[in-house]
Amino acid sequence: MTKRISLTQHLIEQQRLHNKIPSELRLLIEVVGRACKSISHAVGKGALGEVLGSAGSENVQGEVQKKLDVISNEILLEANEWGGHLAGMASEEMETIHPIPNRYPKGEYLLMFDPLDGSSNIDVNVSIGTIFSVLKAPDGMTTPSEQDFLQPGTKQVAAGYAVYGPQTVLVLTTGDGVHCFTLDREMGAWVLTQRDMQIPADTKEFAINASNERHWYPPVKRYVDEMLAGSTGPRGKDFNMRWIASMVADVHRILNRGGVFMYPADAREPDKPGKLRLMYEANPMAFIVEQAGGAATNGDQRILDIQPEKLHQRVAVFLGSKNEVERVTGYHKE
Ligand code: AHG
Ligand code: MN
Ligand code: MN
Ligand code: MN
């Protein structure tokens, strides 16, 4: 039997080898991992756990919250509040930041998350997930302000996501490659199942919500049209399309077999740069994708270089196989 390496063992070994993961950060990642196990458990119960359907409330983005959006947010808050490794948290489902309450010790990290990604898939039993990003709080800071969270993605010290699908997996980077752990449901343990995931530079697969085509700007329209033209078109090959409508699941496919994922800005709302959120969707995914040899831009610049201005800021996203991301980014510059 091959030797099984747990998340804990993997992180401790990384720490010994590269001296890169301080023990507080390791604790933080393990706590997030534990919270994802609880979320996975709630998701898996479905109707039996009475967790499906709408919560009857709206979040700050104006989206109707599903029960599982709210439950997952609470699980992450509760799990991370008392450990002493955090100064504060921020989430898609909370209007403003959540500083660690005074009754608990404070640590030096900031945690941001999309507690449940792919909300429209919850009630139809399609893969959904959790996305998270970790920053260091500014030195000497006692209680964080929203401003303290507004650091570019290059400052992330860790990022990851969990997918609640046929299997529950946790994909993680601390800036030293991307590694995947599968939840052993009987043992309740994260087991290392893929080391150093790599995204091939070329692909024949793309992901975009094509129902928005009539609103696309010319560079996106040109790029997709050329792929659709297939082997007799300018690209000289046939492309396949996939769109799960859960960014985590689309990105997980791309990490495994390549592809390009797009959620562009479009002409519907000219002053709204796309749908996805910079701080807890685009930045963590861009960090992971770059660590796996891929690329991530907003059509103009590297996502990780963007200086955030607002906590819930939206951003256009092109990410995945490097040569494709460079091509579509190039079309924006012509
Ligand atoms: P969330 O469920 O966290 O609000 O995010 C949903 C996002 C993302 O996961 C997905 O790629 C996209 O919304 C799907 O959007 P469309 O419904 O426009 O296809
Ligand atoms: Mn949402
Ligand atoms: Mn999301
Ligand atoms: Mn969400």
Image (cartoon, rainbow, N blue to C red):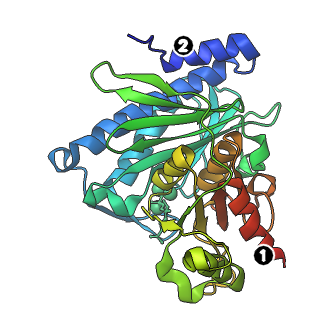
Dividing the picture into quadrants, the one containing residue 143 is top right
Q: Earlier in the sequence, mark 1 or mark 2?
A: 2
Dividing the picture into quadrants, the one containing residue 89 is top right
**Of all residues shown, which one is farthest toward the left?**
48
Q: Position of residue 159 (x, y in %)?
A: 62, 39
Q: Looking at the picture, which amino acid does disc 2 mark? A: Gln
Check residue 9 in the rendering and tell me which mark sits there, or answer none. Answer: 2
Q: Indicate left or right for 2 with 96 as reference.
A: left
Circle 2 — which element? Answer: helix
Name the one closer to the observer, 264 or 93. 264
Q: Position of residue 269 (x, y in %)?
A: 62, 84
Residue pictured at 49% horizontal, 15% vertical: 5
Check residue 100 in the rendering and tell me which mark sits there, or answer none. Answer: none
Image height check: is 51 above or below 111? below
Circle 1 — which element? Answer: helix
Q: Position of residue 257 (x, y in %)?
A: 53, 48
Which quadrant would the N terminus be assigned to in this image? top left
Q: Nearer the viewer, mark 1 or mark 2?
A: 1
Which quadrant would the C terminus be assigned to in this image? bottom right
Name the one closer to the observer, 233 or 141. 233
Check residue 332 in the rendering and tell me which mark sits there, or answer none. Answer: 1
Residue pictured at 58% horizontal, 62% vertical: 261
